[in-house]
Amino acid sequence: MPVTLLGAAEIRALAAELDVTPTKKLGQNFVVDANTVRKIVHAARVQPGERVVEIGPGLGSLTLAILEAGASVTAVEIDHRLAAHLPVTAARHGVADGALTVVDADALRVTELPGEPTVLVANLPYNVSVPVLLHFLETFPYLQRGVVMVQAEVAERLAAAPGSKIYGSPSAKAAWYGSWRLAGAVSRQVFWPVPNVDSLLVAFERDAEARGDDALRRRTFQIIDAAFGQRRKMLRQAVSPLFGGTAATASAALEAVGIDPTLRGEQLTIDDFVRLGASVH
């Protein structure tokens, strides 16, 4: 029996049945268009037999599209009602037993994922999108690639290149794990309720080799936070608390790894930050 997708009328009926009123707090703008969820699955290059983790499946429209593609899904859902009902919806739409596993939990607190998925697919709300992505990439090294739908501003920042106006701490931290790119626009009209912001797809590919161990990652992220915490300040001032407390000692540390102390944080690549992180003892 083929997997069938949710339609707009069924999504509204499900929400009424479960007494779910979409809330801004949880970022519950449900996707009600079948073409859009298929577009997301296609952008993520989901293949039959793959294991996918979906964060925030909601009523299940994107979940069913992933399952339709022949993958199995580990779905992480913070809303207990939605988590409990998702397997019921899946069964009604032709999903085979064992293809869907639901984890009823806050994505920011999850430390284990059944099935060790290699692909991440999600529709993430603005307020938690970056923390959730960084948490998953840090905690689950077997995640190799993914596509997430986020507010346009977040997608553009994650994919931003050094030197651009929107390049910042999230851009540099995301780059620690791999490469990021914009992967398509999403119309406001495919959501219920219709949001007042634009959404984009952003895709990532994890690098074949890690840039370093967790200790180096923490040091590097500390330097990134310092560099962008005082935006538009020269590096020798911004990172001085981490390098002896003065601009002179910070300048010496920067010059020792080949970085101009008069540059600003937004001009540094992740490799620059890593070199600086590796110099901290």
Image: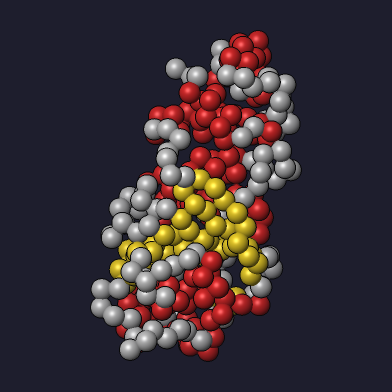
- Judge from the rendering whether residue 42 lies leftward or rightward of residue 229; answer left or right: left
Residue 253 lies, in percent from the top left, at 58, 15
Q: Residue 101: tell me if it is visible.
A: yes
Q: Quadrant of the C terminus?
A: top left
- Judge from the rendering whether residue 3 lies leftward or rightward of residue 244; answer left or right: left
Count of numbered marks: 0
Q: Name the residue at 48% across, 23% down.
A: 278
Q: How is the image coloured?
A: secondary structure
Up-down relation of residue 204 to residue 42 (above or below): above
Residue 10 lies, in percent from the top left, at 48, 88
Up-down relation of residue 95 to residue 229 (above or below): below
Q: Name the residue at 57% across, 35% down.
A: 270
Q: Quadrant of the N terminus?
A: bottom left
Q: Name the residue at 68% across, 20% down.
A: 260
Up-down relation of residue 124 to residue 177 (above or below): below
Residue 208 lies, in percent from the top left, at 43, 44
The residue sitting at the left extreme is 97
Nearer-the-camera pick, 52 or 18: 52
Nearer-the-camera pick, 147 or 46: 46
Nearer-the-camera pick, 7 or 208: 208
Kindly indicate the quadrant of the structure image that contains residue 226.
top right
Nearer-the-camera pick, 257 or 10: 257
Q: Residue 83: tell me if it is visible.
A: no
Residue 243 lies, in percent from the top left, at 56, 16
Q: Name the residue at 41% across, 69% down.
A: 47
